[in-house]
Amino acid sequence: MSNVRFPIIVVNFKTYREATGVKAVALARIAEKVSEETNVCIAVAPQYSDLYRVASEVSIPVFAQHIDPIEPGAYTGHILAESVKEAGAIGSLINHSERRMQLADIDVCVKRCRTLGLISLVCTNTPEVSAAAAALNPDIIAYEPPELIGTGIPVSKAKPEAVTDALKLVEMVNPKVIVLCGAGISRGEDVKVALQLGTKGVLLASGVVKAKDPYSILREMADACL
Ligand code: G3P
């Protein structure tokens, strides 16, 4: 999986102003600095329009936030997997709760990623959907209960049993798939608990992107992985 290692912290920039344009590059540089200091793998997922410049400026893994289930051709306004790869992404989030897809389309996107050597990171909203996604054989699943996204209430502490259910179900369906969790992860302690539950890392956004001091929070989270 290219330069991706586990445990991993994936920072989704979403469409936050604090992580748009030049600020996307600045935040990615902070993630790179923490990754270099701690040797913990930290990846970022900027908006499409920032992918190329972020990927050109940092050496940490960069994910796209979404791809569409299309082949090269006449699909105005769509996101082509080849395009995010050319821009420097090493993988893509698929089916984020804020960009849901139908199962058949998730399947196409996972396969398109595999064909192109991109890492597929499929987001899921329940343990059962995690099991369904595992059957599609993605590289990574990130279980994120939507009701906790953006709340600052960490999934690892608020719903530990749901995280372990997701882990168990994915293991039963497809033990090769790596499982992360996300939603409300805001402190090092939240990351530590997520790893203790058996996940291989976290997918997060506001806890870092909207933090007053993203470096300190990210460093605390990376230290919790050691
Ligand atoms: O993709 C990460 C995400 O949906 C969780 O968001 O702000 O709760 O960390 P947040």
Image (spheres, rainbow, N blue to C red):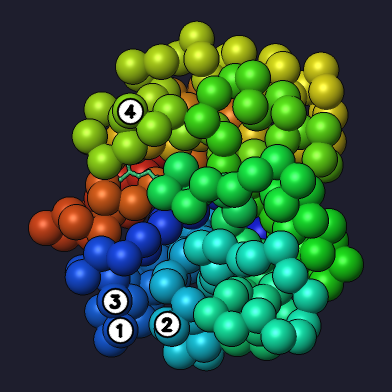
Q: Report how far apart the C-alphas of labels 4 and 2 lie in the structure.
A: 28 Å
Mark 2 or mark 1: which comes first in sequence? 1
Residue at left offset 79%, top offset 75%: 71
Looking at this view, is 80 or 177 the one in front? 80
**Is there CB contact under 8 Å for labels 2 and 3?**
yes
The residue singled out by tag 4 in the image is 147
Q: From this view, report whether residue 34 is shown above or below residue 157.
A: below
For residue 156, which numbered disc appears in the image? none
The residue singled out by tag 3 in the image is 20
Q: From this view, report whether residue 179 is shown above or below residue 116.
A: above
Looking at this view, is 72 or 204 the one in front? 72
Query: SS at mark 1?
Result: loop
Local packing at callout 2 (Cα closer than 10 Å; few below 14, some 14-19, many 20+) is some
Labels 1, 4: front one: 4
**Is there CB contact under 8 Å for labels 3 and 1?**
yes
Q: What amino acid type is highlighted by mark number 1?
A: Gly
**Is there CB contact under 8 Å for labels 2 and 1?**
yes
Q: What amino acid type is highlighted by mark number 3?
A: Thr
Query: SS at mark 4?
Result: helix
